[in-house]
Amino acid sequence: MSSRSQKGRFIAFEGGEGAGKSTQAKLLSDALRGLGVSVDITREPGGTPGAEAIRDLLLNPPTDRKWRGWGARAEALLFAAARSDHVERRIRPALECGTWVICDRFVDSSRAYQGGAGGLGDESILSLHNFGSEGLRPDLTILLDVPADMLGKRLALRDGTGSDAIGGRDAAYHQKVASRFSVIAQSDKNRVVVIDGGRDPQDVHADVAKALNPMISEFIK
Ligand code: T5A
């Protein structure tokens, strides 16, 4: 088992709505706990009481007919504020104690949604992140790649026609999100591993575990 003076590892799952991030985060945390690793599984937006309150503002915004929802900049600031609280109050303290943090979405979601599809650009998002969360990046990001039509079917099966303020945006928006995720993965191959999420959950998990193998072996020396 690892020495407790060692810092924990930070793993993020990314991908479109319904890609299987929560499912894979849970399978991974079970596997790591089985190896005796201390794991904190969390999500964004959210993960602390303050960030969960911001999540609600973002995903279920006020419905006043004269107000047209959050503007692109306000939306990006709210995600960055939620992340700042999450990093300061939960993620960094856990990592410092040697706990592994598995996060369902992190800053690459802001880069893909607000920066890419929302048109704000990567630099603006990264500068908010540098200020709000002192630029914290995961040690490893797993991008689950699933074709849009398969995502639609999964979500229809689970949610019927219901969706939140961001998930309910049009297909062109989600296409831009997917292409920005791919650009991020291409530009940071050491950190981001792309895994085909369109298969049986256990097969996807086997590839996730393979991607983590070097990190696990190093930690459990
Ligand atoms: N957002 C978020 C931003 O715009 N900017 C940001 O910075 C951040 C952090 C968050 C929304 O906010 C946006 C993105 C989102 O629109 P959310 O609810 O947290 O919303 O995120 P979602 O991605 O929408 O969460 P989902 O729960 O819908 O998707 P998951 O976690 O990817 O999928 P999961 O595991 O819950 O699975 C979905 C369904 O598919 C099944 C599951 O059983 C479930 O029914 N499933 C599979 N079926 C077949 N094969 C597999 N391999 C399967 N894996 C899962």
Image: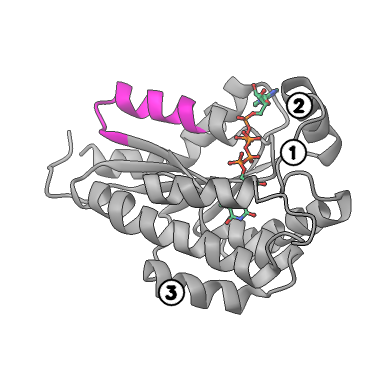
Q: Give the label on residue 130, or none.
A: 3
Q: In the image, 69: left or right of 193?
A: right
Q: Earlier in the sequence, mark 1 or mark 2?
A: 1
Magenta span: 25-39
Q: Give the label on residue 154, or none.
A: 2
Q: Residue at x 76, y 63 (%)?
A: 117
Q: Quadrant of residue 37?
A: top left
Label 1 element class: loop
Q: Crowding at label 3, few (<14), some or many (≥20) Cα neighbours within 10 Å? A: some
Give how far across and how far down residue 79 sits, in percent: 54, 59
- Asked if residue 71 lies in the magenta stretch, the reply is no
Q: Earlier in the sequence, mark 1 or mark 3?
A: 3
Q: Is mark 2 within 8 Å of ligand 1?
A: yes
Mark 1 vs 2: CB contact within 8 A: yes
- Asked if residue 35 lies in the magenta stretch, the reply is yes
Name the residue carrying label 1: 146
Q: Type of residue at label 2?
A: Arg
